[in-house]
Image (cartoon, rainbow, N blue to C red):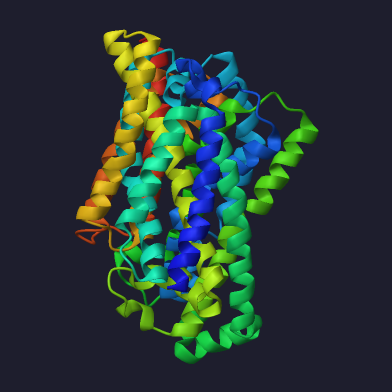
Amino acid sequence: MGDLIYATTFTAVLLVACLTAGVLSKKKSEVFSDWLAGSRNFGPVLTGLALTATWLSGWACLGSMGIVYTFGWSGIWLAGVWTLIGIIPTVTIFGPKLRNRFEELKATTVPQLVGAIYNSKNVAMICSLIYIALLIVYSVGQYKAAATAWYVVTGTSWHISILISAFIMAFYMTVGGYTGTQWALAIQGVFLTVVCFLLAFLALIHTGGPVGLNEALASQDPKLLLPLRSDITKPNLQFAADLIGLTATLGLFVTMAVGFPHNVARFMGLKKINKRELAIMTLVVFITAASPWANLITGLSARAMFGTELFNIPAAKQDAAGPMVALAINPALAGAYVAAVFAAALSTLAGMVLVMAGSLTRDVIQNISKISDESSLKLAKILTVFFSLIPLIWVVTNPPELLAYLMAGAAVGMGCIFFYVLALSLFWKPHKLGAIACMVYGFIMTILGGYYVYTAAEWGWGNWWWATFIGCGIAYFAFSFIGKRLNI
């Protein structure tokens, strides 16, 4: 009962704070363009915290622990050891340029920015539809993460807590728009960072420090200490098995950091900053976005503490690593951890839902029907509720077995496609034909990978990522060249 009380209390406090942020932002979100992009005057600290919150999803705060619990040290490559190598270049190199492009092109959504760069509404619509398809898949993992943490810690059904959280999230987004969401993200970013570092510190002490941790792992299986596991032969586990998988995970984190629209959108509201303010924002992100490193320690500690017992937990299995460690240390900490997972899951989900609802309205429906801004605002709010509930229905009816696998698949597509279509377009003059070819190829490869990697088990995960990334690059540059030569 104490676990349920702590989890309920911490989660309720977090949700009330986010709800308050949305309500206080209502007056700044009554016009469609303001609802989409805010007043564009957020400072570096708040922007950095919001970016961290959207970057650290349910994968980072729960799924990653399941990966290292399963594979030991070789699981760190997919579980987040590259997280700062991916996000810091996004902050320092791409962020300021993205911010300036949003302002220069008067874009209020990421697909609208992409369409403006290529001077094509068709590119914007294709971009929007691909984003929506992949974001729905990625968003399922957010609810799964929160549901797993709640169930393992409290031992009660997660449905009511998740449903309440979903409606509260939808409410503060519909009322507060971009401004309210940005403030809620910052609140969530602070909370999850503090809890994840605290949990890792206490977990490491509980296992006897670094030496005790590794000794416990070695006593179970010496292979848990290996940086790569040559004994792993399943294609979908290549990320822990060889150099191709290792380098693919590095590429994954670099590309998805700037390819995720909910990350990119955080720079849309950033005010014009100087070098000092950029350094401050980078420091904020460096500290807070290092949380996955702490979570790796928690996941390894779970394996040291529980052995293979967690594989037998119904539904949750290895994804129960984080909650079980928190429970073993302190009930209050377990309750705070549940709220931290909710913060990570809902923050990423909120960023994605806002992208999907705003983009579908602005970049698809407005381009087809020319509805007024007033009607567009109403429609976007309705779509916000819709996109908040669609992935919840998926989790209720057919929850994914292992969180990290599902989310990594969607991340491959978004990262490989939009690293070229969006990030590289900031440095050279592309052509719309190249963008379209890249998006089509990348989307097809994402679908094929879902089957041949995870279902048929015929493609290696790392081979799939490299084939998608290289193929997207070839399509992007080759068709851009063709388009320019033919003056299409």
Left or right of 113 in this view: 463: left
Asked whether 386 or 50 is in front, the reply is 386
Q: Position of residue 228 (x, y in %)?
A: 47, 72
Q: Residue furthest bottom?
A: 219
Q: Is residue 377 left or right of residue 192?
A: left
In the displayed structure, does residue 238 sit left or right of residue 53? left
Residue 45 sits in quarter: top right
Q: Is residue 351 something that shows in the picture?
A: yes
Quarter of the image with the N terminus is bottom left
Front residue of 348/113: it is 348
Instruction: Tell which of 143 and 481 is nearer to you.
Output: 143
Could you tell me which residue is drawn at 61 percent across and 87 percent down? 212
Q: Quadrant of the C terminus?
A: top left
Decide: is 200 above or below 310.
above
Q: How far from the left and from the top, in percent, is residue 311? A: 33, 77
Measured as percent of width and height from the top left, residue 5 is found at: 46, 66
Q: Residue furthest right?
A: 276
- What residue is drawn where x is 43% and y is 67%? 4
Q: Is residue 156 left or right of residue 306?
A: left
> Where on the picture, by quarter, is residue 41?
top right
| Residue 275: image location, x then y, percent | 78, 32
- Can residue 127 be seen? no
Q: How many marks?
A: 0
Which residue is located at x 60 percent, y 82 percent?
206
Q: Which sits in the foreground, 93 or 192? A: 192
